[in-house]
Image (tube, rainbow, N blue to C red):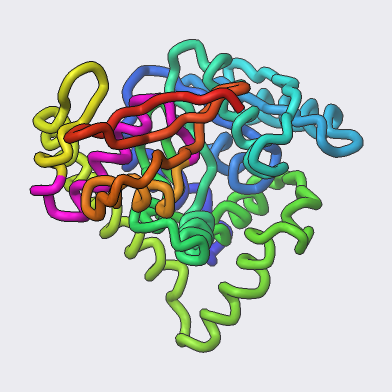
Amino acid sequence: MDRSGAVAALRQSVAADAGGIDGSTWCVALSGGPDSLALTAVAANLRPTTALIVDHGLQSGSDTVADAARRQALALGCVAAQVITVEVGRAGGPEAAARQARYAALDAARDGAPVLLGHTLDDQAETVLLGLGRGSGARSIAGMRPHDPPWHRPLLGVRRTLTHAVCDQLGLTPWQDPHNADRRFTRVRLRHEVLPLLEDVLGGGVAEALARTATALREDTETLDALAGEALAGARTGPGGLDTARLAALPGALRRRVIRVWLLDGGACDLTDIQIRAVDRLVTAWRGQGGVAVGSGLRKQRLFAARHGGALKLHTEPV
């Protein structure tokens, strides 16, 4: 990487992506790390930028790190920089809980503006590998969307080496999160062990290939999702039910997407492929079996999908 041209290269990449981002101002989610710091430096020179720094309070001295990021943002030309302190719960494990708290805080603080996130091509490659390992289907392997308003990821086509080079060129000292070197976390081991091994065995270009795979699968998934939306409208029956005969006539991949959307509309969350296929068997392999429990945000109640005659319906039961 030619460090002398790193800033220009990153600015060109972000500027090219900015056409898909509405508004005359935007926010940047700034952790203080090299990716978000480099993005902040470039974004502040393209539009009036507010830096949003989330302090998760999970590490000693996190408030000092957050304040340092705030001061760096203002020095880089941001019109404002705000530190948001959050309380991280436990649901889904530490990484998922921190992510949920972070996105909720960013959404509340953005004041209607789009938010730029510093995810790079390397992050996308890691996300694809995580999806493969979990066996959670094409939607997971499709990775992160470049534009998922209000969230925007203008660095998804950029390698991490470029953001580090930008920080070097500008003389910035990014925060090195110790969690990014903690091999207790699956993503850290993917980054430092699995991806380098794959690059060695397959002769390089693995991260780019994984990112291309994500793009191709995302395009396919979005097309199927649009078809599923049309099929869902045609299969609805009664108050919140689905006609099993109409579902049975659909191709399996399309039918399971219809079921997924229907479950989500009914209050389900954190759905797994196993749960969706179990509900699908209520349509394709009906033998009078009972309902299927699915994840939901309900307290003291469980959400079930069950078949009643020729219709799928949702109901709750006390825990």
- The total number of labels drawn is 0
Residue 297's x, y, as percent?
54, 26
Residue occupying image coordinates x 21% and y 34%: 309
147, 190: nearer the viewer? 190
Q: Residue furthest right?
A: 60
* Horizontal side of residue 311 vs 319, given as left or right: left
Residue 153's x, y, as percent?
44, 41
Magenta-drawn segment: 248-270
Q: Is residue 256 magenta?
A: yes
> In the rendered image, which quarter is residue 96 located in?
top right
Q: Quadrant of the C terminus?
A: top right
153, 251: nearer the viewer? 251
> In the rendered image, which quarter is residue 14 located in?
top left
100, 319: nearer the viewer? 319
Q: Is residue 261 magenta?
A: yes
Residue 119's x, y, as percent?
52, 47
Residue occupying image coordinates x 45% and y 62%: 135
219, 11: nearer the viewer? 219
Considering only vertical position in the picture, is 72 above or below 142? above
Q: Quadrant of the N terminus?
A: bottom right
Residue 272 visible to the viewer: yes
Magenta segment's dominant SS is: helix
Q: Residue furthest front?
A: 288
* Horizontal side of residue 272 vs 220, given as left or right: right
Residue occupying image coordinates x 57% and y 35%: 40
Residue 73's x, y, as percent?
66, 28
* Horizontal side of residue 311 vs 33, given as left or right: left
Residue occupying image coordinates x 23% and y 40%: 258
> In the rendered image, which quarter is residue 137 located in?
bottom left
